[in-house]
Image: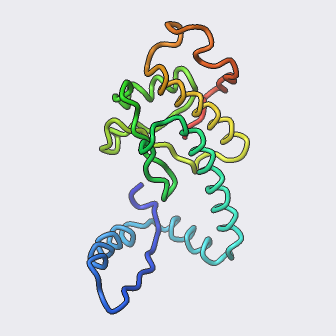
Amino acid sequence: MMGWRVGYIAYSAPGGASPLYSQLLKAQDTMAICVNQPAQHAALAALTSGGEYMRGNIMGLAANRELVLDALGALPPGSVVGGFSIYFWIKLPGACSDDVITVEFLVKHFGVMLVPGNSCGMSGYVRVSFSNVIGVRMAEACARLKRAVTYLVRHGLAEPDALPDGALHSDAAPVPEGGSAL
């Protein structure tokens, strides 16, 4: 997303600079360069339109974040990291360590698309975004994600037809065309 991000950091070090200061300068360099004009205009509009628009979006993101956290509840403690921006990193259960194969499995059987960790240098993880979908569609996507995570924890990547009836849960809703990208 190089060039599409716009950001700032508000920082104050009581009594002068701290070790954090030099690290923040490094991060600042990547925020201020290469920002295209449409992104600059969008940022300006967001900053000058009043807080209502941003408060509404922040509340929507907070609700989505909670839906995703609930969907990931079957994972062992420590498996979910991040969530401070618009996504979580999920350490895959032991039997599912190949993130690309796991993502393909989730698309095929649950209609849920996640980002394989190896595309971001995080093999053995998947990235789950909570900013792409809103409302009822997000709730449906998280219901499928919850079934998928529960399945992976219990059965790994075992093909559903090789398991007893009901392994995919009888409450599994049909996957809409195109599934959901999280």
Residue, x 39% and y 58% (percent of image)? 2
**Residue 170 image point, x, y percent:** 68, 17
| Left-right relation of 51 to 105 | right
Quadrant hosting residue 89: top left
Q: Identify whether 106 is placed above or below 49.
A: above
Q: How is the image coloured?
A: rainbow
Q: Nearer the viewer, residue 177 or 166?
A: 166
Residue, x 43% and y 49% (percent of image)? 81
Q: Residue furthest bottom?
A: 15
**Residue 49 image point, x, y percent:** 67, 75
Q: Identify whether 124 is placed above or below 3.
A: above
| Left-right relation of 152 to 133 | left
**Residue 40 image point, x, y percent:** 51, 70
Query: Which image quarter is the N terminus in?
Result: bottom left
**Residue 174 image point, x, y percent:** 68, 22
| Left-right relation of 63 to 105 | right
How many marks on residues? Answer: 0
Q: Nearer the viewer, residue 148 or 180?
A: 148
| Left-right relation of 45 to 10 | right
Query: Which image quarter is the C terminus in?
Result: top right
Residue, x 30% and y 44% (percent of image)? 121
